Amino acid sequence: TCTLGALHLHPIKSCAGIELREALLTETGLDLDRTWMVADASGRMVTQRQQPRLALIRTTLRSSDLVLRAPGMLALHLQLDAVDTPARAQVWDDEVQAYEMGALAHQWISDFLGVPGLRLLRFDPDQRRLSNPKWTGDVQAENAFADGFPLLVASTASLDELNRRLVQAGDAPVTMQRFRPNLVL
């Protein structure tokens, strides 16, 4: 028997998620999931692979804004219905349309991560970014800034097995948050 154990939304790619009781499923996955992304000055994605401190940025969705909080920083409030100037963004090999979230958001991200020139981008909802057909076949699965698929799924059984192997090899176990799934089975 398989049941849904947890449901997570990650508004900003590579940042901490929000545990939900319910969510709206759209063409690109859960509504507002990975809709924002941190990028370098040229628009290339910046993830926890390069900046592990992204995991410390916590988000809260309110009726009209997205609130970002991080250790040592004042909260940053971003209006859900407001963007700044159009921009280009690169997610892996895909170049897509996006919007900059403004100078204050850029400065906040750069200050927290200690990297000048970072930008916070929002995915252009008119943009269509498809998963690799090698994995989806004839299904055209749309994504926003997710790595490759509209929904990311993990299971507690898989995590248990991974942790068993890690401990057996003398390494520390990891938590489910490490994988930032939307659905935990």
Image (tube, rainbow, N blue to C red):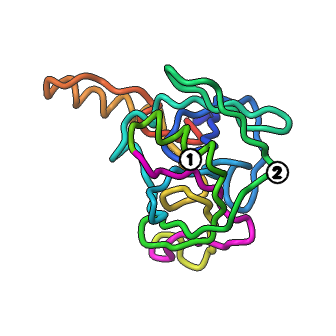
Left or right: where does residue 172 sit relative to residue 107?
left
Query: The residue under label 2 is which amino acid type?
Result: Asp
Instruction: Report the mark closest to the observer, 2 or 1.
Output: 1
Image quadrant occupied by the N terminus: top right
Splitting the image into 4 quarters, where does residue 28 fall? bottom right
Q: Dot 2, how many residues are within 10 Å of its Cα: few (below 14), some (14-19), or many (20+)?
A: few
Considering only vertical position in the picture, is 165 above or below 149? Answer: above
Considering only vertical position in the picture, is 144 above or below 170? Answer: below
Q: Secondary structure at mark 2?
A: loop
Q: Secondary structure at mark 1?
A: helix
Query: The residue under label 1 is which amino acid type?
Result: His
- Let me know if residue 123 is in the magenta part: yes
Pick out the residue farthest to the right: 63
What residue appears at the point 63 percent right and 31 percent down from the top-left corner? Answer: 18
Residue 106: numbered disc? 1
Which residue is denoted by mark 2 in the rendering? 81
What residue appears at the point 75 percent right and 51 percent down from the top-left corner? Answer: 25
